[in-house]
Image (tube, rainbow, N blue to C red):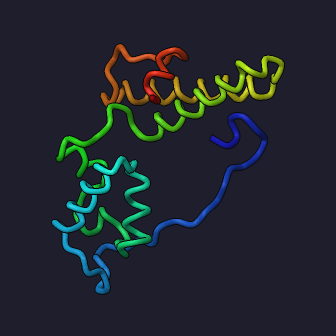
Amino acid sequence: MARMFSRKRGVSGSHKPIVKEVPKWVEYKKDEVEMLVVKLRKQECSPAMIGTILRDQYGVPSVKLICGVSVVDILKKNKLDSKLPEDMLNLIKTAVSVTAHMKNNKKDVHSMRGLLQTESKIRRLAKYYKKTNVLPADWFYNRDRAKLIVQ
């Protein structure tokens, strides 16, 4: 989404290596990794944070390699998933914080433009999630409801 709101070409970064099998140095089994994912979720960690903690503290390179399913699928299986997808929730949190900033700084037109762009991204993402049946068909974004969602 880099070129949509600027003339830049986007951010290039590293990618995970294409590996088909679990490395020999990984000491965790499938059941242990699933228990760690559930334990971290009960400590209020997001799926992205769970993956980072497993990588950095437990030495698990990829949950999908070991378990065969992603972190989100493990959470769905254990009924610990959130109502909204993580990327949508992060955009809503950003919009709520910018809205709070706009209440104190009414003349900040640059932040107002950023808020409009963020809300546009939320609506586009909601359109995609409605199409793929992740969100209900009657879901819509509203600034007042966004505060309640984040809390």
Between residues 119 and 111, which one lies in front from this camera angle? 111
The residue that appears at 31% across and 56% down in the rendered structure is 40
Seen in the picture, residue 28 relative to 128 is either above or below; the reply is below
The image shows residue 79, relative to residue 35, as above or below, that is above
Query: At x 33% / y 17%, what residue is drawn?
Result: 137
Q: Nearer the viewer, residue 3 or 68?
A: 68
Quadrant in which the N terminus is drawn: top right
In the displayed structure, 91 sits above or below 103; it is: below
Query: What residue is rendered at 18% in x and 46% in y?
Result: 77
Task: Determine which quarter of the picture holds residue 109.
Answer: top right
Q: Quadrant of the C terminus?
A: top left
> Residue 110: percent from the left, percent from the top?
80, 28
- Horizontally, residue 63 falls left or right of residue 17, namely left
Taking 63 as reference, is 124 above or below it?
above
Tell me where residue 117 sits by quadrant: top right
Instruction: Please provide percent x and percent y for residue 31.
Output: 16, 66
Counting from the top left corner in percent of width and height, residue 90 is at 51, 38
Name the residue furthest bottom: 24
Q: Residue at x 19, y 68 (%)?
A: 32
